[in-house]
Amino acid sequence: MLETHVLNLLVLIPAITTAALFFIPAENRLGPRVLSVAAGGLTLLLSGYLYFSYDQAAGGFQFLFAMDWVPSLGIQHKVGVDGISIAMVMLTAVVYTAGALVSWHVEKRSKDFYILLNALVTGVFGVFVALDLFFFYFYYELAVVPMYLLIGYWGSANREYATMKLTLYLTAGAVVALLGLLMLYFSGITPEPTFDLLAIKQAVDAGGGLDLATQNILFPILLVGFATIAPMWPLHTWSPGGHAAAPSAASMMHAGVLMKLGSYAIIRIAMPLLPEGAVTWLPWVAVLCSFNIIYGGLVAMNQRDMKFVIGYSSSSHMGYVLLGIAAISDLSLSGAVFLMFAHGIMTALAFSLIGFFYDQTHTRMLDDLGGLMKQIPFVGICFVMMAMASLGLPGFANFASELMVIVGSWERYPIPTICALFGLVIGATYLLRTVKAAFLGDMDPKWEKLRDAKGLLERSPFLLLLGVLIFFGFAPWTLVDVISTGVEPLVDTLHAAEAALGR
């Protein structure tokens, strides 16, 4: 029973929580918090069940469930996961749980805040388990829409501009992606039009894919549509402002999970269904991701707002993900998915820590801070460890994933890989400078009343995120082996496309 409906439960738990919160009286401050944390914990348990129950020897999509919705249009609620999806589901569950805990002290219309947070998580889980393109897009939109309100109402300075820019960029990208999905639907790959991702993929594998000219038109449409949320340079400018203006949990979900939807959609839809188009266009992605890495890092180096530092750093790190995708080797693509997981956990930790002391200092400007390690040592140590993970120190999951991307991309794209190596140096520079400016040196006396994170409730989200980074840093194979079961068939498909094109 659980095996059949575990994926439905993953989507239903935050969805039911969203609905249940409407019936909790507004004056009940504890109910929404407890219910949301409990929902996060349940999804964490279910993601662990998926991780341990997934049959690596069999591979492919497992825990399948399908139910007709509009048969005449070929729409069904079909869900399933492979190794790639499981990594993303685990990432979402961890960040969801930590975000619900971090938001415990939200006082301003806290019930409404948790309603939107749970609705957003419902969409994210739906994207990662959906095997029907209609529902994939439905959940994709559901994941994006709540962010507008979370930032626009609960955000900090400049939130109106940030949320409007974010909404316009992501809506434009979503419309382009929708165009591409509709073109796939009406393309004639299958005898009857269908949104069934597996049926379309089966037809492609059987030699019924689109001709090269059509793929070369359709692939960049899907690429641009989904790369907007990745974000790929030069479509990235909405992202750092959204990070900076969002409240802590929204920043965690935004940087930790939402930014991964675009890369996941490219891996899940564009590359396997349009392999020859992917082979043609991915070299351009390798060039553009170099701008992500270098430009994002240099801009982060010149920021004085800590959230903007992490925001531009996130754009830079997503360049490594795109490089790993473009290199289409088992090692690089597995590393890219693993980096999506590691980076999501790391950025969630970064924004949760910044949010903790921002609630007390009401500033994130490095010039206003300094010496905070003396006053908030637990938060300071966690921040230092987060910075070490971000700059790729061995012992954290980021190191193993970035190493896989760099080694796996070297043979195919040496120049972008060299740029990626320089990006590591740039990253170490701005992260160490940020640690020094905020936590070391002399402390301004006005910060003497700062309160450190104390007790299990306050420390648990930071410990959860750090524990995941360290565990998979020391034992990366425990997740990489699962991811590889989903990566290897995709790489084989793309290599076959290369051979067919004589490349």
Image (cartoon, rainbow, N blue to C red):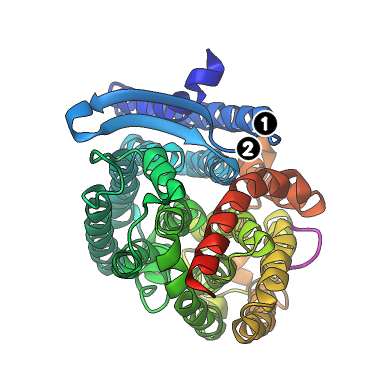
SS at badge 2: loop
SS at badge 1: loop
Question: What residue is pinned by disc 1?
Answer: 55
Does residue 393 belong to the magenta stretch?
yes
Magenta-tinted stretch: 392-396
Q: Quadrant of residue 58?
A: top right
The answer to which of 211 and 41 lies nearer the viewer is 211
Prevailing secondary structure class for the magenta stretch in the rendered image: loop
Q: Amino acid at mark 2?
A: Gly
Q: Residue at x 70, y 50 (%)?
A: 480
78 above or below 296? above
Question: In the picture provided, is 300 more to the left or to the right than 465?
Answer: left
Q: Amino acid at mark 1?
A: Asp
The answer to which of 488 and 378 lies nearer the viewer is 488
Q: Residue at x 45, y 79 (%)?
A: 284
Q: Is residue 333 visible?
A: yes
Q: Position of residue 221 (x, y in %)?
A: 30, 66
238 above or below 150? below
